[in-house]
Amino acid sequence: MTQPLRFILVGLGTMGSVWCRQTVPYLTGSLGAEFTAAVDPNEASHRHAIEAGLSPDSCYTDLRSALQQHNADFVISVVPPALHEGIVDLALEFGCDILSEKPIADTLEASCRIFHKVTAAGRKMAVTMSHRFDQDKQTLERLIHSGKYGAVDSIIGRFSADFRRFASWGKFRHEMEYPLLVEGAIHHFDILRSLAGSNPKTLYAKSWKADWGQYSGDSNTMVICEMENGVKTFFEGSKTSAATTNSWSQEYFRAECDKATLELSRREVTARSSLGFPYPELEVIPLAKQTVWTNTWLAELFVDWLRGGSIPPNSLEDNLQCTAMVFAAIESARTGKEIHVPSFLHEYLAAAAE
Ligand SMILES: NC(=O)c1ccc[n+]([C@@H]2O[C@H](COP(=O)([O-])OP(=O)(O)OC[C@H]3O[C@@H](n4cnc5c(N)ncnc54)[C@H](O)[C@@H]3O)[C@@H](O)[C@H]2O)c1
């Protein structure tokens, strides 16, 4: 019998507690992995891991101690973005693979360094882009790529919600420079890439803070991006709307295809066409079905990869593309210029390799 894969969960805050409730039980149950330790400097948060079945003796306040005491196969990193690189460094030092919460890191420099370090160490790393792998987004993605409605011309996306009040979107996001782009829009950029079936080519962005938003950095954005396959995309994001219309898991995406307009709005997917039979005037598309979605599905794909299965769609290498899109948007917003994303990423990767 093969040994179960052993993992350490690092970070038991808002999202770490969600991992403990939703994904850890699936990892230890259906996937047969072993929850060997958990880490958070805030001891009060250890209860989340204990409630998920971990012994209090296996809860630590620093990762090095946990790695020294437990022979782990992989680390799940659920700490704020500025701390991701330190977790990766320690995981690699102890020969562990890494499943990390998005984004790869808080800067493109750090993201590229992580890419080189993981590659040089010959380890596996994937990034949990929960929203792209949610049921509603996957239904739209599969519908577009079924080819039933012809080629895609353009795709529009919207996130719009009231998170104006300080700490209403988690304190650290109200204190960072580009919270919407780094912590939010990275999900929507990843969704646009997957719907378009292509990586970004050229991008132009505006980024700002609405007067009434209690943020140090930019809470709003508008981004136009043309993908390498010619699909044009537009994204509007606001964390300071007076009313919440398209918040997390309720976003709006519309794909203009040759034969139909495909729309995802607050978890309902429709196809509309005025071209007549066989194209529907209005059809509500049933949501795709499978056992698990979001991070739980991504944990399953990651474990399968470690056991010799195929590389998952949210691998570190793939994720570098939407990370590049985020930082290209910041660069465009700062300079007022359109950014050629492949050259931009290439420049940062080369600098990080020196
Ligand atoms: N996919 C999603 O939908 C989603 C949603 C929310 C957050 N996230 C991501 O999850 C990560 C964490 O975000 P959050 O909202 O849970 O933040 P949080 O601030 O609520 O929690 C972070 C936790 O990390 C702990 N921590 C700090 N330094 C640590 C260290 N060196 N070792 C171990 N633990 C440490 C803190 O004590 C805290 O408990 C971020 O990367 C964020 O982008 C993803």
Image (spheres, rainbow, N blue to C red):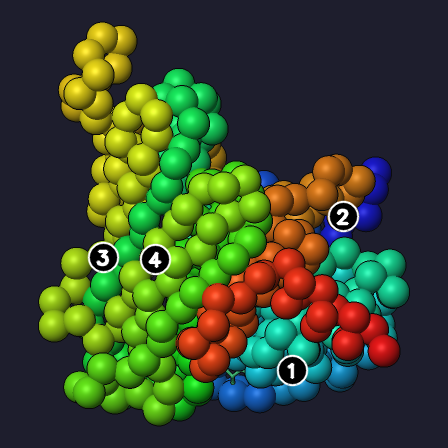
Mark sitting earlier along the chain (2/3)? 3
Q: Nearer the viewer, residue 219 or 204?
A: 204
Of callouts 4 and 1, which one flags the residue occurring earlier in the amino acid sequence?
1
What amino acid type should be assigned to the residue bearing mark 3?
A: Asn
Identify the residue shown where x is 87% and y is 59%.
122
Q: Which kind of residue does numbered mark 4 sit on? A: Phe
- The image quadrant where one finds the N terminus is top right
Near mark 2 (Cα within 10 A), the count class, few <14, some 14-19 or many ≥20, is: some
User: Identity of the amino acid at label 2?
Assistant: Leu
Amino acid type of the residue tagged 1 in the rendering: Tyr
Query: What residue sits right under mark 4 in the picture?
Result: 235
Work out whether mark 3 precedes mark 4 in sequence or the reverse, and give the earlier one: 4
Taking the image as shown, residue 204 lies to the left or right of residue 228, namely left
Q: Nearer the viewer, mark 2 or mark 3?
A: 3
Look at 40% across and 90% down and name the residue there.
Answer: 175
Q: Label 1 near label 4: C-beta < 8 Å?
A: no
Q: Which residue is mark 2?
A: 306
| Mark 3 residue element | loop
- Alpha carbon of mark 2 to alpha carbon of mark 3: how far? 36 Å
Which disc is residue 60 wearing? 1
Q: Give the mark, 1 or 3, whose residue is nearer the N terminus.
A: 1
Q: Give the answer, above or below, for where 27 lies relative to 209.
A: above
Is residue 275 in sight in this rendering? yes
Q: Secondary structure at mark 2?
A: helix
Look at discs 3 and 4 and give the one toward the viewer: 4
Q: Are marks 3 and 4 in contact (CB under 8 Å)?
A: no
